[in-house]
Image: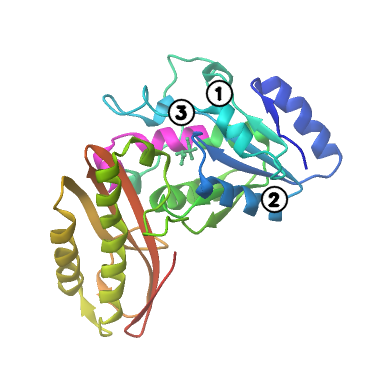
Amino acid sequence: MTAPRVIHRADELAELIAGWKNAGDTIALIPTMGALHDGHLALVSRGRAECSRVVVSVFVNPLQFGVGEDFDRYPRTLGHDVQALDNLGVDVVFAPDVTDVYPDWPDTKPTIFAGPVGDTYEGQDRPGHFDGVLTVVSKLFDLVGCDKAVFGQKDAQQVFLVSQMAGHRARPVSISVVDTVRDTDGLALSSRNFYLSDTDRDSATALHRALVQVSGSLDGLPDGARREDVEAILASAEDDIRQDRRTLHYLDVVHRDTFMPFRGGGSAGVVVIVACSVGGVRLIDALDVTISGGTAQGGA
Ligand code: PAF
């Protein structure tokens, strides 16, 4: 295996992709905003296992950042990213200029809308965020002509909305979801961890602890439990999060197949989701849980 080829221009990529298609290759896309870490490398390895060609896109998408968010200071580390992908079987790193993705930039507006689920949780605090995500992901699907795209489970709401969008396309793209990669103390790997001071980095382990605590308590819920029971479980974990310079944005249990709040009842596939700012850095995490007849089994 060798170093990936770095392509900046959409027309150069299109020419290469046409050759791959003629040769009968299948293409996996790993969409990223760069600042790659082991979590991204796990996505690459899934793409490599499922398709004959792998494209990693590196593009900090201005459409998904709101006013006052971290678009300007988001880490841009293309040289390091390309090196990190050396010898992993990645064919191309596609790092386009903004006008290759949005020819009408800076007048570009979102063209794909996330709908009601896009206004909840991350979307409630970051209005328009998911419209920006879906617009760029759909553009990247078109530019790369991929058969599959691989995403990380940590961004559970993004996974839900992208899967919905991908399934509705004229030429559907199949979505693979990879378990969250964590440090040994449970902290989910994220490019935004780069912003954390050492103290805040330790404090950020509270997100995963809360997910595990909630997942463990869901375990004890009897069949027929009600939303009040779920809320009591959440309230106790929320108290722990709201300490040590941490600001809780949300902690909830949602149905995996609708992203609507879990109201209790019987067996269900759910996701425990959390967003919390630590020292001013907004972090999210999620844990997949299957509740079956009063027992819950946690995922990564
Ligand atoms: O998860 C991300 O890094 C971004 O939201 C994505 C999917 C690359 C779109 O810009």
Which span is picked out in magenta? 121-136
Q: Residues within 10 Å of mark 2 (few under 14, many from 20)?
A: many
Residue 92 at x, y percent in the picture? 69, 34
Residue 91 at x, y percent in the picture? 73, 37
Identify the amino acid type marked 2: Arg
Identify the amino acid type marked 3: Asn
The residue where tag 2 is placed is 48
The residue where tag 1 is placed is 101
Question: Is 22 drawn above or below residue 265 in the view shown?
Answer: above
Instruction: Point out which mark residue 181 bears.
Output: none
Which label's residue is closer to the chain start, 2 or 1? Answer: 2
Identify the amino acid type marked 1: Val
Which label's residue is closer to the chain start, 1 or 3? Answer: 3
> Looking at the image, which residue is at 65% across and 50% down?
47
Instruction: Point out which mark residue 61 bears.
Output: 3
Please tell me whether residue 238 belongs to the stretch shown in magenta: no
Label 2 CB less than 8 angstroms from ligand 1:
no
Is the Cβ of the residue at disc 1 closer than 8 Å to that at disc 3? Answer: yes
Residue 93 at x, y percent in the picture? 65, 32
Label 3 CB less than 8 angstroms from ligand 1:
yes
